[in-house]
Image (spheres, rainbow, N blue to C red):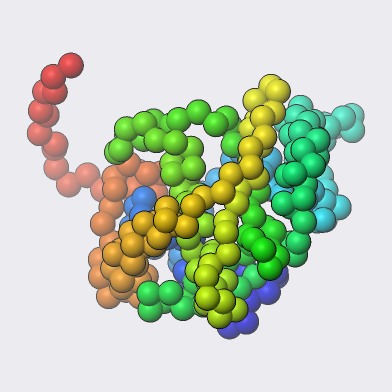
């Protein structure tokens, strides 16, 4: 299928292509990832995602469309903007006060590409793209380390898998254009703190290469699951697993040391 802005997030596109978000979902819980792929489970839209979409729409030149589609979620009955969106405007202003960040946000917006990586088709939608770099715009709670129950304390970039995004985006673009070296990948990030903080970060290519090796090691199994040839493993912790769990017998309690 030919990818467009209208069908990029469709169920058909998700079945035909892999994306960073889909890989992240399978990597977190194979059963949940498969259910999402087939439209059997949908994560509720959080305030964090909504605010991120608001800021993205502003810098992508799609702000008017966002307001038309989401106006009922943005304003009170008396017409005043909700506090979370008023604060999002402060986040936007914090970025606009940084000339270097604004320079890095210049280029084609929401550019769609697709290519084969590791034997499967991937789709990407780049926030900002030009011949010098790929830039992604992120809104985050703050820039502190985050505790991951499986891995311990991690930096916010690896916790949210933004390095994975950079790895796939740069390699798909390289495959499409045929350039000898991948473009550098940058993040313009703004925090949701009372006083928004702004960062401009480049993720080194050696970091992206390391992440790609992880993707290569896992994607074959994930794709077999997606095609119905291998049964997915349930994590038994996510919302999908809790929603669909069936108790067949008692668990054996084991005391843990404190």
In terms of image quadrants, where is residue 226? Answer: bottom left
Quarter that holds the C terminus:
top left
Q: Residue furthest top?
A: 258
Mark yes or no: residue 65 visible.
yes
Q: Quadrant of residue 131?
A: bottom right
Q: Residue at x 32, y 41 (%)?
A: 237
Residue 220 percent location from the top left of the image: 31, 71
Quadrant including the N terminus: bottom right
Picture residue at 64% right of the left edge, 42% below the top = 200
Question: Foreground residue, 39 or 219?
Answer: 219
Q: Relative to the observer, which residue lies in front, 154 or 194? A: 154
* Residue 87: x %, y % from top left: 75, 29
Q: Residue 71, position in %: x, y?
A: 81, 45
Q: In this orientation, does residue 138 appear?
A: no
Q: Residue at x 51, y 50 (%)?
A: 203
Q: Is residue 41 above or below residue 220?
A: above
Count all numbered tags in the image, as a single digit. 0
- Residue 33 against residue 172 in the figure, above or below: above
């Amino acid at each position: 299928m030919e990818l467009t802005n209208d069908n990029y997030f469709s169920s058909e596109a998700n079945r035909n292509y892999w994306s960073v978000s889909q890989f992240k979902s399978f990597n977190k819980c194979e059963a949940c990832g498969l259910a999402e792929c087939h439209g059997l489970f949908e994560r509720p839209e959080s305030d964090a995602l909504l605010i991120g979409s608001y800021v993205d729409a502003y810098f992508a030149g799609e702000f008017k469309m966002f307001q038309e589609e989401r106006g009922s979620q943005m304003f009170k009955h008396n017409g005043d903007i909700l506090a979370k969106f008023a604060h999002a405007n402060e986040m936007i202003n914090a970025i606009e006060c940084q000339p270097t960040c604004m320079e890095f946000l210049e280029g084609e917006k929401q550019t769609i590409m697709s290519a084969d990586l590791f034997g499967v088709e991937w789709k990407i939608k780049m926030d900002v793209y030009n011949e010098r770099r790929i830039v992604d715009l992120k809104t985050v709670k703050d820039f502190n380390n985050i505790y991951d129950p499986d891995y311990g304390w991690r930096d916010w970039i690896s916790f949210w898998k933004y390095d994975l995004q950079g790895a796939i985006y740069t390699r798909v673009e390289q495959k499409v254009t045929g350039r000898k070296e991948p473009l550098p990948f940058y993040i313009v990030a703004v925090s949701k703190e009372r006083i928004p903080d702004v960062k401009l970060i480049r993720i080194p290519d050696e970091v992206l290469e390391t992440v790609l090796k992880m993707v290569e090691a896992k994607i074959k199994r994930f794709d077999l699951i997606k095609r119905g040839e291998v049964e997915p493993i349930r994590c038994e912790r996510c919302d999908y697993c809790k929603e669909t769990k069936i108790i067949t017998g008692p668990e054996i309690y084991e005391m843990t040391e404190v």
